[in-house]
């Protein structure tokens, strides 16, 4: 999966056996981009953070389920 497919701002590719591993890789990538002050990534982080803050926790759950389903639908390579 790419950073963009996970709500990020670039086409950096992540590869893992589990969705949890993809999440961790994405998190590490996001932290690195934040340290570099990469504005497109910072903007993407703000969007996700706002989704997390929403009073509608179902929206965040739905977002996570969509990302997990996209991961599960990818062919094993």
Image: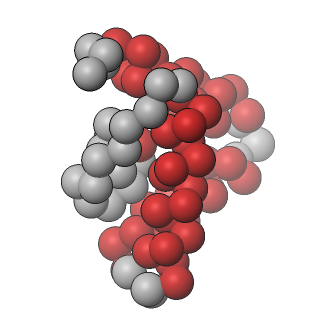
Q: Residue at x 47, y 62 (%)?
A: 29
Residue 27: name its quadrant: bottom right
44 shown above or below 16: below
Total numbered labels placed on residues in the image: 0
- In the rendered image, residue 33, in percent from the top left (x then y), is placed at 44, 74
The picture places residue 72, in percent across and down from the top left corner, at: 42, 15
The C terminus: image quadrant? top left
Give the image location of residue 32, x and y in percent.
49, 74
Residue at the image position 62 percent from the left and 56 percent from the top: 50
Q: Is residue 27 left or right of residue 57?
A: left
- Asked whether the viewer can see residue 4, the reply is no
The foreground one among 31 and 62 is 31
Q: Dividing the image into 4 quarters, which one contains the N terminus? A: top left
Task: Give the residue displayed 23% in from the left and 54% down from the top.
Answer: 11
State the image coordinates of residue 5 (x, y, percent, origin top left). Answer: 33, 40
Instruction: Work out whether 38 lies above or below 10.
Output: below
Q: Is residue 33 left or right of residue 48?
A: left
Residue 69 showing in the rendered view: yes
Residue, x 60% and y 33% (percent of image)? 20
53 or 21: nearer the viewer: 21
Question: Which of the 4 image quadrants contains residue 43?
Answer: bottom left
Q: How is the image coloured?
A: secondary structure
Depth order, front residue of 26/38 = 26
């Amino acid at each position: 999966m790419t950073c963009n497919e996970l709500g990020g701002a670039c086409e950096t590719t992540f590869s893992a056996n589990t969705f949890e591993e993809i999440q961790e890789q994405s998190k590490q990538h996001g932290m690195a981009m934040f340290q570099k002050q990469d504005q497109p990534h910072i903007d993407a982080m703000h969007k996700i953070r706002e989704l997390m803050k929403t009073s509608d926790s179902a929206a965040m759950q739905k977002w996570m389920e969509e990302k997990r389903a996209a991961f599960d639908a990818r062919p094993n390579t």
